[in-house]
Amino acid sequence: MAPSQRCPLCRQTFFCGRGHVYSRKHQRQLKEALERLLPQVEAARKAIRAAQVERYVPEHDRCCWCLCCGREVRKHLSHGNLTVLHGGLLEHLASPEHKKATNRFWWENKAEFQMKEKFLISSQDYARFKKSMVKGLDSYEEKEDEVIKEMAAQIREVEHSRQELVRSVLEVGFPRRSQSSIQIHLIPGSPRSSISPTSSSKRSHGLHASSAQLEFP
């Protein structure tokens, strides 16, 4: 009897040696597993020519399972407060370790040879991605500068509106006094003149009062 072996795809132990990988069940499990990984690889491949940079959020720390390597890998590439979407997965797919593991996985599981290239990123494509990433970072910085300028303009506008509001409130609360409401009293013998706001009726009384103070020798 052949020694027992464990199939991670089928999640079962078998005793038929290498014949298990040719079984209908194993090939079905292999196809389904590759179809689950393929959409993530295709999404990452689209970023080669158009890298997308975003502000970092905790969701960017998510990982994805690499079927060929049998381990989790970073999906995105984050540094500081910036994240390059799909950068982590592209970096992994282009690594020599992933290429070596993929060749071994394809041989061990007898997967379709034509499918293997879909799960690999060439060094030329990764070089294109790095150039695209530089452009994406520059574009992001330009957008950030525009946002800062817009915020500064909004702050200036709000401050100007606040100043206009304060000025209008002060003018309503303390109206300017017209010259017609100011009366000058001249008292003979007084070194100073007295200025006080009075009505027209009070002005006439003030004149009489001043006349009454005149004394003749």
Image (cartoon, rainbow, N blue to C red):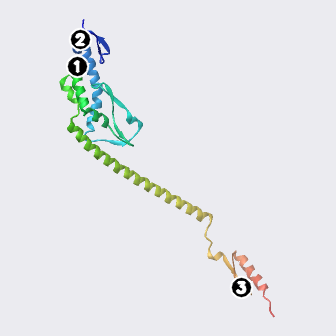
2 vs 3, front mark:
2
Q: Earlier in the sequence, mark 1 or mark 3?
A: 1
Instruction: Please say whether residue 104 is visible from this viewpoint.
Output: yes
Number of numbered markers: 3
Q: In the picture provided, is 122 more to the left or to the right than 143?
A: left
The kind of residue on which mark 3 rests is Pro
The kind of residue on which mark 1 rests is Glu
Where residue 116 sits: x, y (%)? Answer: 21, 27
Instruction: Identify residue for label 2.
Output: 17
Q: For mark 3, does the 10 Å Cα neighbourhood hold few (<14), some (14 to 19), or many (20 or more) residues?
A: few
Instruction: Please say whether residue 86 is visible from this viewpoint.
Output: no
Q: For mark 2, does the 10 Å Cα neighbourhood hold few (<14), some (14 to 19), or many (20 or more) residues?
A: few
Instruction: Identify residue for label 3.
Output: 191
The kind of residue on which mark 2 rests is Gly
Where residue 92 sits: x, y (%)? Answer: 28, 33
Where residue 186 sits: x, y (%)? Answer: 71, 84
Q: Which residue lies furthest to the bottom in this view?
A: 217
Residue at 22% x, 13% y: name it: 18
Where residue 88 sits: x, y (%)? Answer: 31, 35
Q: Earlier in the sequence, mark 1 or mark 2?
A: 2
Give the spatial CA distance, label 1 vs label 2: 12 Å
Disc ID at residue 108: 1
Depicted 157 relative to depicted 38: above or below:
below
